[in-house]
Amino acid sequence: MVDELPHMLQRGEPARLFPVLAEKSKEGRALSVLLACVSSVDDLARTLLSTLGQRFGQRLRIRTFTEVVLSREPEGVSGRPDGLIVVETGRRVWSALVEAKVGGSRLDSEQMEAYLKLARTNGIDALVTISNDFAAVPDHHPVRVGRLPKGVGLYHWSWTSILTHGKVLLAAKGVEDNEQRFLLDELVRFLDHPSSGVRRFDQMDGNWRHIVTAVVSGASLSTSMGTVTDTVANWHQECRDLALKLMEGVNSNVVIRLPSAHRSDPRLRIDDEAKRLCEFSVLSVEFNIPDAASPIKVEADLRTRTIHVHMTLSAPQDRKSARARTNWVLRQLAGSEPTDLHVKAIFPGRVIATQHPLAAVRMEPDVLQASKPNLAPKAFEIRLVCDAGKRFAGPKTFVEDLEKSALRFYAQVGQRLKNWQPTAPKMIDKPSEMLADASAPDETDQG
């Protein structure tokens, strides 16, 4: 028996795991396979929907459709979104239109604005787009649209983020049902194949070389230059892809750290970071890795053509001397062999920090001593510095070196670091009679 269509659909086909579509319909096939798995693999559905802020209990019903024709069209608006997701749990129903692109196909702002109006008219809660573009968080859309209709959310998934969530679920053995696990494994295999049209972000655009050359030659950048904002937008795409690579590497969720103002306003994030690029010639990002000693920060310095990756540890407060604190951090770095690793000592107040290569600090820990004698560091920064040279200006080689540096730093250094924690307080000496009383049986407890 075929389920009755939801009220917002005039026509639609249940998403098929094996869609019968034209060979050229690569987007339709990819989306149908994905939506069929979303409706069948509970853990995948909950994982993806949770990124949209949707939380559902154990009892839920998910229906997914392709080739949809909506019941109502506002005047002057038409279009056929690629799919629909309907989630039912108890009396609550949540729904979202889906528009997908694969390969080099790009999302179109006018099309999305039309679909948002269609969603509003038909009582649909959201529009979810899927493409090879990346977004820091799902509600930071890679394409700028006008004001959202009231009550309709706009979200974005990259194909790579879906693929990564699937791989993490499989690696963590988060899908216990054998049939569902098989389906998820097949989805991952499908999306991982080059023929699927799923692409990672692997190079900056053509403006990158010109921006780097301008900075190195001493030219000034301006936020009014479109190439500057395009470069920042490219950087954001790479940051998200790097977060997904870290996530796949540690088999746990890795998120980009954003100030609250940037989280609520992605355009402000681009504007602020474009200003910083013009003023300091630096692009930077921070990642939160679960249970890591600190966030991991990645910086690209265009002026020196270097890539920096670092983490910061608070110095142990139970060690008073600078040397003792330095030895504490050196013990954590035992076995770390990168020749491009540096240790930076950060001091209280306005005292200038000191920094030296790890090899030099190992030979003489006092080399990190501050200009003020007997002043101990309050924190240590462990920093990898990659001098990329001419490769820095290459749109593809820059991304290769950036990702290699970040992954290598965390694998060889970051995952070993631990923050100092004070020891538990010890019991002060007590008179022997009090200890005896504490160990004596309580007469009131005896029958």
Image (cartoon, rainbow, N blue to C red):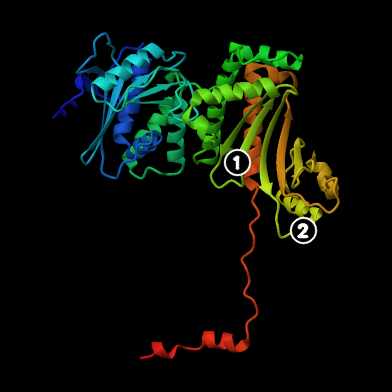
* Residue most extreme to the front: 349
Residue highlighted by disc 2:
320
Which percent across, then down, holds residue 164? 47, 32
Residue 414 against residue 134 in the figure, above or below: below
Q: Is residue 71 visible?
A: yes
Q: Nearer the viewer, residue 141 or 394?
A: 141
Dot 1 or dot 2, earlier in sequence: 1
The answer to whether 171 appears left or right of 378 in the picture is left
Q: Position of residue 219 (x, y in %)?
A: 73, 13
Q: Which numbered tag is attached to residue 128?
A: none
- Mark 2 residue type: Lys
Q: Residue at x 61, y 66 (%)?
A: 424
Q: Is residue 5 above or below residue 60?
A: above
Q: Which residue is mark 1?
A: 295
Residue 14: x and y, percent?
24, 25
Amino acid found under the numbered disc labelled 1: Pro
Residue 183 located left or right of residue 243: left
- Look at discs 1 and 2 and give the one toward the viewer: 2
Residue at the image position 60 percent from the left and 12 percent from the top:
224
Mark 1 burial class by Cα count in 10 Å: few <14, some 14-19, many 20+: many
